[in-house]
Image: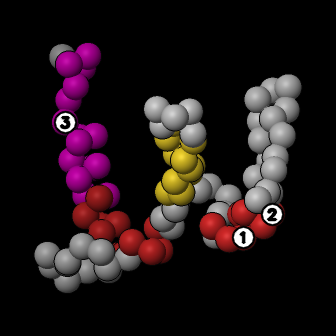
């Protein structure tokens, strides 16, 4: 059993052995569940990196490449900027 103390600011340092055992990393979230018996359960929600989500959704069309996307965005922005706004009328 590992023991930790609460600081005057209500903070607790999670002991290194507990962090290692649970595989806790910076950015992970802890969920505290308090039971009717006044016991606390801690669940870990691992933070997912964007790189871990790569390929999670199926591609609906082939990737056209960065240059094609930049061109399309530039064309769309140009069209928006060339249209008169309400304040111009």
Query: Which image quarter is the N terminus in?
Result: bottom right
Cα distance in 3D space between marks 3 and 1: 58 Å
Frontmost of labels 3 and 2 is: 2
Q: Position of residue 63 (x, y in %)?
A: 25, 80
Q: Position of residue 75 (x, y in %)?
A: 25, 58
Frontmost of labels 3 and 1 is: 1
Q: Quadrant of residue 89?
A: top left
Which label was assigned to residue 20? 1
Looking at the image, is mark 3 or mark 1 earlier in the sequence? 1
Q: Nearer the viewer, residue 34 or 7?
A: 34
Q: To which residue does mark 2 refer?
A: 16
Looking at the image, is mark 3 or mark 2 earlier in the sequence? 2
Q: To which residue does mark 3 refer?
A: 83
Cα distance in 3D space between marks 3 and 2: 60 Å
What secondary structure is found at the residue carrying circle 2? helix
What secondary structure is found at the residue carrying circle 3? loop
């Amino acid at each position: 059993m590992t023991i930790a103390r609460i600081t005057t600011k209500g903070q607790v340092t999670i002991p290194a052995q507990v962090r290692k055992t649970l595989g806790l990393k910076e950015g992970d979230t802890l969920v505290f569940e308090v039971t009717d018996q006044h016991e606390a359960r801690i669940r870990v929600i691992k933070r997912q990196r964007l790189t871990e989500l790569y390929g999670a959704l199926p591609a609906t069309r082939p990737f056209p490449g960065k240059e094609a996307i930049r061109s399309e965005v530039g064309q769309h922005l140009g069209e928006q900027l060339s249209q008169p706004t309400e304040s111009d009328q």
